[in-house]
Image (cartoon, grey):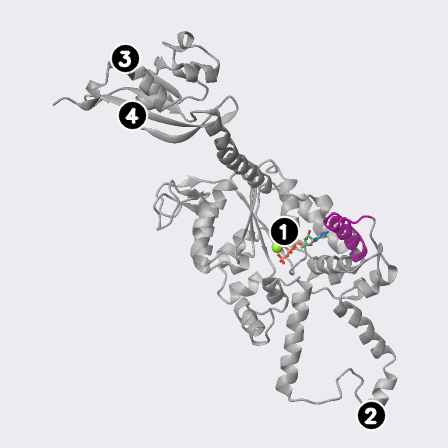
Amino acid sequence: MNRPFEQVPKSWHEQIINLLAERVVIVDRNGMILYINEGYCEFIGTTVEEAVNRPVQDVIENSRMHIVAQSGQKELAALQKINGSEMIANRFPIFENGELVGAIGSVMFRNPEEWRMYKTKIQSLVEELNYYQAKVQRDLRSKYTFKDLIGSSPAFLAVKKLAERVSGSNSSVLLNGESGTGKELFAHAIHNSSVRAAFPFVAINCSSIPEHLLESELFGYEDGAFTGAKKGGKKGQFEIANEGTLFLDEIGDMPLSMQSKLLRVLQEKELHRVGGHKPIPVDVRIIAATHRDLEQLVEEGKFRQDLYYRLNVIKIDIPPLRERNEDIPDIAKALLNKLEPKFYRHGLEISNEVKERLMQHSWPGNVRELENVLERSINVLDGKTIQLVHLPLYLRDQETKSKEENDGQSFTRSLSTPFRSSIPLTVQPLKETLAQAEKQAIQKALTMTNGNKIEAAKLLKVGKTSFYDKCRAYRIQ
Ligand SMILES: Nc1ncnc2c1ncn2[C@@H]1O[C@H](COP(=O)(O)OP(=O)(O)OP(=O)(O)O)[C@@H](O)[C@H]1O
Ligand SMILES: [Mg+2]
């Protein structure tokens, strides 16, 4: 039977090809150009005579036609950079009697209008992608150095010195300190002054990743490891951090099952992706951090002792702010400088009374709480100097309380009891009083953490679930 195409006169073929696609190239098995149309030649700044019978990769920038002519694998909608623009190329192998004989390729866009539409749509997507890729790369760099760690109290300087000294070594570091003491800042600084500084700094928060995702997040997965797994698999944070530093924040919250897997990787210096069989070597320095007492967790059977020893090679205890309150004015100044651009302000100051007040407070939320207090103050500040009235209520309240305590005489007299305190005179059931105190404590903690519930739960030393339950019960948003 006559195949319909054979009825199409041969003399029409070239025209048909050129109408179907504006830029076409045909190569033989060795990637030599057999045919290239004028549109393509014009686009790449050559002529048909010059291009034909030459290796395609010498004529067309970033061409993969010679590869397709060898592999027999078609490539559809592949991005190809030509003349500084990302073009979309389709490449098909050509078979004759089942044998691979060459390939045909086309680059899309038939007219300037199509090109313009493409440019506005796809090109902007490509640019966006490039932007985010660069941003991810930047984020993988650590941002802070020891210079950013403010404080000159002996307690703080000793810790800073220890951290600086150990940054050159490859041993694991365990940063211990209350919430907001600067554990993450220390981790950045240690990485930045180590020989690994040019390589990635990858931070992962063990408490914020659901248990079933933690393994693939840390170790990555192979193609088809589970339903919904990305095609081609995915690198885990360990692999991304290769040659650099992996910061395991909130290590005390890592589930026991993951602790064993982590220990194995640290000992063997190689990992297995989820669903993968071949071991992948990794060279990563671990900096772990926690606000919890790991030794106690070990005693309670909630943290593996062997992992604890492995991580605890160098332990750095960051003192809470209340134990170094002489650092508060300097830190407050530095934080103010950091906050100014966010509010388009400049030259902000802190009054002496405020400095004193800040030094009196016990800062359960440490530097982060101080940062939040300053941010709130800037919000209500018209002039340049932060005064007592600009402080949040709970810090201003301290004044009232200590005043009452100092000249508490009138108060005691009116109470006509031996107690000298600020107990309200009305009495209500104990249950309600406790509930009220609990509600106030929660609200205060939320104020200190700028509404961050996880941080607030940490401050109050209660579990996340019970904290959320209480918020619901007291209708706290
Ligand atoms: N010594 C310091 N000098 C200047 N800024 C600091 C200092 N310590 C902490 N900060 C700032 O305080 C904030 C909290 O620090 P960081 O996130 O490192 O604390 P953390 O110990 O990791 O807290 P958490 O346990 O809640 O995660 C950050 O904005 C950080 O920049
Ligand atoms: Mg932290």
Q: Secondary structure at mark 1?
A: helix
* In magenta segment, residue 371: no
Q: For the view shown, which residue lies furthest in the left direction?
A: 1
Q: Give the answer, above or below, for where 309 lies relative to 128.
A: below
- Residue 67: x, y in percent? 35, 22
The one of 92 and 472 positioned closer to us in this rendering: 92
Ligand 2 is found in the corner quadrant, namely: bottom right
- Residue 220: x, y in percent? 43, 46
At a point 43% along the width and 26% down the height, the residue shown is 109
The quarter of the rendered structure image containing the N terminus is: top left
Mark earlier in primary sequence (4, 2): 4
Marking on residue 416: 2
Q: Mark 3: is the Cβ under 8 angstroms from ligand 2?
A: no
Q: What range of the chain is rendered magenta? A: 328-346
Mark earlier in primary sequence (3, 4): 3
In-image side of 195 versus 223 (left or right): right
